[in-house]
Amino acid sequence: MTHDPSRRRLLRGIGAATVGVPLLGWSTGCTFTEPGTGAPKGSVLDRGRDQGYLKVAIFNEPPYTKLEVDGTVTGAEPDVLRAVLKRLGIDDIDGVRIEYDAMIPALKSGQVDVIAAGLFMKQSRCSEVAYTEPVIVSTESFAVPPGNPDKVTTIQDVLDNPKLKIAVLPGGFEEGILISAKVPESQRVIVRDNVTGVEALEAGRADAFLLPTLSLEGLAKDNDSFEVTDPVEDAPATGSGAAFEQSQTDDVAEYNDELAKFKQTSDFDELMDKWGFDADAARNATTEELCKAEG
């Protein structure tokens, strides 16, 4: 198959995959993996240099990831990944839209080479994938009806009021926060994406929508039906980097070396500023620290 690195295309058709539903094997460039056979062996970076790109699991959640109407993949995570890979001799990335709870299975099965989607680090995920050093550090907030009638500002507020219904994405970091805090399943409303989360709030099916602060602020720019709370004080520190298959330890080390150099450039500061993140927060955070988050 001919690959056009100037066309950062979105490979559609896998977005509906979820845990428990097998992902179909498919071929791009020179790599093919049958379902269930696991990720291809050998260096993923060498494979990327050979074929000119890597297949990347993403979502459509600005500012972490963003899908343009022409299929262009951008956002803070993919942009950093693309910049570092170019420094490593890999021309481009191909984005595959996958639900959060299906990303790690897709990585393990070889459907994608790497995850760059704001898949926040926590203990369970860090035990399954090899994360690079962080590129973004984030806070969590609630989307609530105007005036915040239920006064929802903390996770403890949710625990104290069993009538509250909180919308979260399936397999997302926020669902993990509620589960770790022992918020009953009856209080958790699972929504497909950011749009349906806001719709659940507008329709009264949820009293609040828990999501990263920047994601909610981005949604609020085009929707005045809700307001965004201050960062949730009792939510754990969150952040993410690219996630590789666990066997790729040498590649992760090579990537981290180049990422560390890129973090010291003005290009990194400009990229972080473009998407609303603090470059110094990313420089000061570590994978070891963020992987201590429960869940």
Image (cartoon, rainbow, N blue to C red):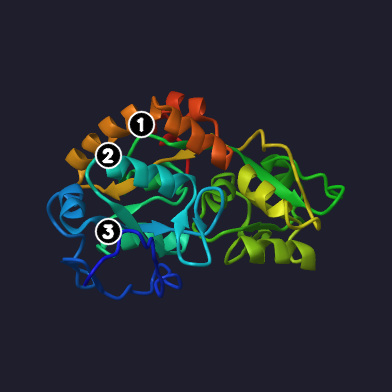
Q: Which residue is mark 3?
A: 108
Q: Residue 87, which numbered label?
A: 2
Give the mark nearest the N terminus, 1 or 3.
3
Whether residue 25 is visible here, answered yes or no, is yes
Circle number at residue 186: none
Q: Residues within 10 Å of mark 1 (few under 14, many from 20)?
A: some
Question: Which mark lies nearer to you, 1 or 3?
Answer: 1
Give how far across and how far down residue 11 sits, in percent.
38, 69
Crowd band around label 3 with a 10 angstrom C-alpha radius: few (<14), some (14–19), many (20+): many
**What amino acid type is highlighted by mark number 1?**
Phe
Using a 10 Å C-alpha cutoff, classify the residue at mark 2 as few (fewer than 14 neighbours), some (14 to 19) or many (20 or more).
some
Q: Nearer the viewer, mark 3 or mark 2?
A: 2
Residue 278 vs 181, above or below: the answer is above
Q: Which residue is mark 1?
A: 262
Cα–Cα span, label 3 and label 2: 25 Å
Residue appearing at x 29%, y 64% in the figure? 4
Q: Quadrant of residue 265?
A: top left
Contact between marks 1 and 3 (CB within 8 A): the answer is: no
Q: Position of residue 204 (x, y in %)?
A: 79, 65
In the rendered image, the quadrant that contains the N terminus is bottom left
Asked if 210 appears above or below 140 in the picture, the reply is below
Q: CA distance from mark 2 to mark 1?
A: 9 Å
Under mark 3, the amino acid is Lys
In the image as oriented, which residue stretches furthest toward the left?
42
Q: Quadrant of residue 167?
A: bottom right
The residue located at (73%, 57%) in the rendering is 222
Element at label 1? helix
Pointer 2 or 1: first along the chain: 2
Q: Nearer the viewer, residue 118 or 258?
A: 258
